[in-house]
């Protein structure tokens, strides 16, 4: 896999304490898999730095913060992700070896 799989976070701008916890958890996951994962953080009301995955896009315009996706798979909705659930989804998605499609919108 030449590109890295994404962990996408949707957080408040500026981040709340829960958003900061979600960011820290995602950063630890990326540190554990530096060649395979990258972190993309989208701030509510802020322009996106890059196109989101379809999973993120399909979540709709109203998203609670913090929310998290791994390779387009929702792992947390309006709460800090559970570390064990995030680990299981990361490992499962990495084992598939396919990157989630990106939104064209």
Image (tube, grey):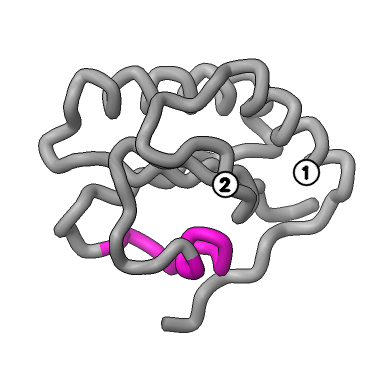
Quadrant of res 85? top right
Q: Specify the label residue 74 is tagged with.
A: 2
Residue 91 horizontal/vertical position (percent):
79, 31
What residue do we see at 29% from left, 61% from top? 62
Q: Residue furthest bottom?
A: 105
Q: In the image, is 66 to the left or to the right of 4?
A: left
Q: Specify the label residue 66 is tagged with.
A: none
Residue 12 horizontal/vertical position (percent):
19, 40
Q: Give the magenta-colored segment's residue range.
A: 48-58
What residue do we see at 69% from left, 23% from top? 87
In the image, is residue 97 above or below residue 67?
below
Whether the magenta-drawn stretch holds residue 91 is answered as no
Residue 30 horizontal/vertical position (percent):
57, 27
Quadrant of res 89? top right
Q: Which residue is mark 1?
A: 93
In the image, is residue 91 above or below residue 52?
above
Can you say which quadrant of the picture contains the C terminus?
A: bottom left
Q: In the image, is 2 to the left or to the right of 12?
A: right
In the image, is residue 37 above or below residue 43?
above
Camera-side mark, 2 or 1: 2
Closer to the camera, 51 or 89?
A: 89
Whether the magenta-drawn stretch holds residue 53 is answered as yes
What residue do we see at 39% from left, 29% from top? 79
Q: Residue furthest left?
A: 14
Closer to the camera, 29 or 12?
A: 12
Q: Are marks 2 and 1 in contact (CB under 8 Å)?
A: no
What residue do we see at 88% from left, 40% from top? 95
Give SS at disc 2.
Answer: strand
**Along the polypeptide, which appears first: circle 2 or circle 1?**
2
Marks 2/1: CA distance? 12 Å
């Amino acid at each position: 896999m030449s590109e890295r799989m994404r962990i996408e976070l949707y957080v408040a701008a500026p981040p709340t304490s829960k958003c900061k916890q979600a960011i820290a958890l995602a950063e630890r996951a990326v540190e554990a898999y530096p060649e395979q994962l990258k972190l993309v953080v989208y701030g509510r009301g802020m322009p996106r730095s890059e196109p989101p995955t379809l999973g993120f896009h399909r979540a709709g315009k109203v998203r609670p913060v913090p929310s998290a996706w791994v390779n387009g798979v929702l792992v947390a909705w309006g709460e800090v992700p559970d570390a064990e659930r995030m680990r299981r989804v990361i490992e499962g998605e990495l084992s598939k070896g396919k990157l989630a499609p990106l939104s064209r919108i």
